Amino acid sequence: MSRRILIACASFGYLFIALFFAALLIAHWIPPMAPNWSAERVAAFYTDHANSIRTGLVVMLVGAVATAPFVAALSSLIRRIDSRLAPLAAIQLVCGAANVAAIFVPVLIFTATAYRPDRSPDITMALNDLGWISLVMNAFPAIGQATVVGVAILADKRPTPLLPRWAAYLNFWMAFLFLPSILLTYFKTGPFAWNGILSFWVAASAFGAWFLVMTYLMVRAASRVDDDRAPAVLEPVA
Amino acid sequence: MWVFPALVLATLSSWLLGVEGSTSTAIGCAVVAIALIKVRLVGLHFMELRNAPAALRVAFEIYVAVTGTTLLTLYLVL
Amino acid sequence: MTATAAETEHSAPPHHRHIPGEPGLWIFLLGDMIMFSVFFGFIAVLHGRHPRMFRASQQALHPDLGLLNTLLLLTASALVARGLRQLRSGRPARTLPWALLCALGFAAVKGCEYALVIRDGHTPSSNDFFMYYFVFTGIHLAHLTIGIGALTVLVVLSRRRALSPGHLLVAEGAAAYWHMVDLLWLVLFPLFYLVA
């Protein structure tokens, strides 16, 4: 039974990616707005696309929750590599939970921004900045998560490890690709701005690819784990 | 052990070419080409990719070729 | 030195194909190199679009320090390559601590150059040239710092009496990572300092 639960939980990774990128498309956020747009242009964008933005955000909100089973399955698999890796599994869980928040927070800010698009454009622009910065600069939980997953995979010393060792190095590379987005705080144009090649396009592609590869590997690994010990039968309370 | 002296010579020659402050495109491209040749030497000899399985060696050669042609094209066209 | 070279040329016949380090490590190494190629592209595009600004800003760098750093990295790489061959054949690899010293020297020289450039009033926010210069060489310096860790692992391994195949794999991986740090600088250096 636990094998089927693991496979089901891991598969939520596919659902998340589908919902997340669908949401970005529905909300007209690919390509992203530019940080150097004027307040009027930002306000006009929200007025023109108010309902698509609101709908996209609802889809993304649902998507964010879909990462929870995925993260739980990953921690469970890490513990199955070696029970002594429990602290690493816990770090992964904490970072994964932070990632849920890292999607929830910008979604709620954007929802507030799109709630009254006819307000003063300066306020819309400030809220829009807040939304984009929290959506793109939130990479650190994901960096921690990818790093700790990589370490856990390398700690698997069995001849046929649960997750292949190359996946560890892929995780380290992904952690590196997420890194440039922290520089967006300094730039309104160029590769490090929130719509830049390195902060947005590379990081978003890496994020999507990471989820797809990890989901595939986790489903494959889950189908190999021992199916379980049934829960112990408890003595009736006297 | 000719690789290390070759790398030092290549470094010094590109330094002499570049540090003159010449703005000619030809010299710029020569400096970029020397850099990519050095990259290939480091990869094949120091990283020992010349003894690596074909797939890895080919991946590296493609990397050098694509990076080199892209950079040279950018310097020539822009 | 010549004898060692001849020996290794012959000890690696063409039919013996060997991946240095763990195969998976090469995903990270090649991936990182691709990322840096994107950086190189940004420098080339900036140079093409704003040649005068590029050239004027370039004057504020210190090409002699850049050259010194290139030579330090090349020396370290040659020493690491030699040390790895010695580790494989079970001989003492005395060159490795010197490689570590070269790596520390690079970091020190880079720190001095940053200080000189900033003292002259150039910061990442001055213009796009300095933004790229500080960010890309900074990311490279971060890689070098990890490389110092890799070289330390190599030095520690070289103190062991005998290396297991697993240790040798780690040593090869550490060496390959170090060579990547060298290789990336070999392109960054001419693009920032030499191409005018």
Image (tube, coloured by chain):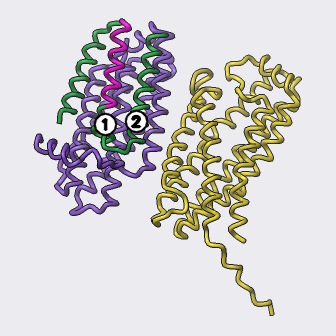
Q: Is residue B39 magenta?
A: yes
The image quadrant that residue C90 belongs to is bottom left
Residue A14 numbered tag: none
Q: Is residue C104 visible?
A: no
Q: Chain of mark 1?
A: B
Labels 1 and 2 within one chain: yes
Residue B44 numbered tag: 1
Identified by mark 2, the residue type is: Phe
**Closest to the observer: B68 or A76?**
B68
Name the image quarter holding the C terminus of chain C: top left
Q: Which chain is yellow?
A: A
Q: Is residue B45 left or right of residue A188?
A: left
Identified by mark 1, the residue type is: Leu
Task: Label 2: state its secondary structure.
Answer: helix
Contact, CB < 8 Å: mark 1 with mark 2? yes
Q: Up-down: is C82 above or below B24?
A: below
The residue drawn where x is 45% and y is 26% is: B66
Q: Is residue A64 left or right of residue C142?
A: right
Instruction: Give the Cα distance between marks 1 and 2.
Output: 9 Å
Prevailing secondary structure class for the magenta stretch in the rendered image: helix
Q: Magenta region: which residues?
A: B24-40
Name the image quarter holding the N terminus of chain C: top left
Q: Is residue A85 visible?
A: yes
The residue drawn where x is 86% and y is 26% is: A117
Q: Is residue A235 magenta?
A: no
**Closest to the observer: B1 or A208?**
B1
The residue drawn where x is 66% and y is 78% is: A229
The spot of residue C148 in percent (x, y) is 33, 44
Q: Which residue is mark 2?
A: B60
Task: Label 1: state its secondary structure.
Answer: helix
